[in-house]
Image (cartoon, grey):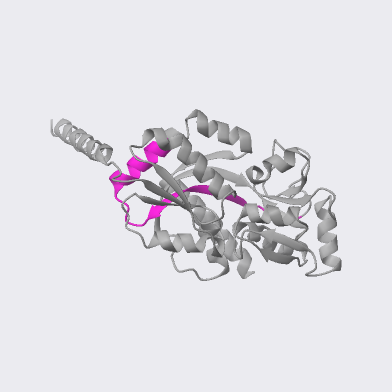
Amino acid sequence: MFGRRSLLAGGATLAATSAAQAAWEPARAIQIIVGFAPGGGADLAARAAGEASTPFFPTALVVVNRPGAGGAIAAQAVAGMVPDGLNLLVGGGSESTSLPAFREVPYDPKRSFRAVIRLTRQPLLIVAKRGGRFTDIRQAVEAAKANPGAIPHASSGIGSIYHAVFVLLQQAAGVEFLHIPFTGGAPSLAALMSNTVDLAVLAPEEMAGLSSAGEVVPLAVASEQRLPPFPNVPTLKECGWNVLVENMKGLIAPAGLPDEIYVSLHDRFRRGMRAPAWNTFLERTGAMDGYLDGPGFQAAMDSVLDALKVAVRR
């Protein structure tokens, strides 16, 4: 009898908790803050998630770009905001997983935020321009070996996850490239197309149009396996360099976000990820659905950061 009463009491508590969680509603428009320039992978994922999830929110979802310092400017701003669910950061990339491995940042990537949901996994490709100096990643590495520091490559900022690809490649291959940082994937692509750099690191969605047109040539991917849209592009591991780096994008809030707000945000964005608009985004850009709940997303970010810290120290 005691056990049954305990069960009933527990059920009542759960029901009350669920009702409280379902009661949270945003008081005004929710800002989705992106630490990179418009047109890059973080920006595209934010806008797609906002479009797909808007029908499930009573207020607007507004994307705000605050580029600079590899995403650290936006991350610092969000870390200092009130955890009321009205300001979210697109995290999981440089600001969360690589920049803190390279230098001190004015926030704690593991404690200054509460992860809400992971949206995408992003393979990272080293690419060249059609008609450029390189048609094969081995050519580029050999050129860097012959002329240390003379082969320029673009990234989305010093210490960014895109920068990390070349840092790890340089260590694995024993060469030195010339790093030219920009504020996001789109400016990096522009630099590549204008012949400012010979190589760039990009996500598939950032170069989808130009790749389809044959204007951009993928040379290698920093994933465990080849990508279905690019079956002829080798992995860096296949080429003899054990470099495995993937970007990811999701939404994180300032630390201290109450449980009821977390649940409401997670569930609404999760519904958006099941909407046709989200599937259209994935199909159009080649991005990969990377759903994880908040705790799973935080664990994934922590794992990448810890691995990069070891690599950078070496």
The x, y position of residue 238, in whole percent, is 76, 48
Residue depicted at x 45% and y 69%: 106
Residue nearest the viewer, comparing 285 with 171: 285
The number of callouts visible is 0
123 on left or right of 169: left
Can the viewer see residue 39 in this picture? yes
Q: Nearer the viewer, residue 121 or 7?
A: 121
Residue 159 relative to residue 238: left or right: left
Specify the quadrant of the image occupied by residue 3.
top left
Q: Residue at x 58, y 35 (%)?
A: 282
Residue 188 or 115: which is nearer the viewer? 188
Residue reaching furthest front?
194
**Left or right, 188 with reference to 254:** right
Q: Nearer the viewer, residue 165 or 205?
A: 205
- Visible residue check, residue 111: no
Counting from the top left corner in percent of width and height, residue 74 is at: 47, 60
> At x 60% / y 56%, what residue is drawn?
184
Return the residue found at the far top.
276
Query: Is residue 187 shown above or below 107?
Result: above
Measured as percent of width and height from the top left, residue 18 is found at 25, 37
Q: Vertical placement of 77 versus 236: above or below?
A: below
Q: Is residue 234 magenta?
A: no
What is the magenta range? Answer: 241-270
Quadrant of residue 284 within the rendered picture: top right
Above or below — where is 5 with respect to 208? Answer: above
Does residue 61 sit above or below 244 in this rendering? above
**Quadrant of the snapshot with the N terminus:** top left
255 magenta-colored:
yes
**On-image quarter of the C terminus:** bottom right
List x then y, in percent, for residue 112: 40, 61
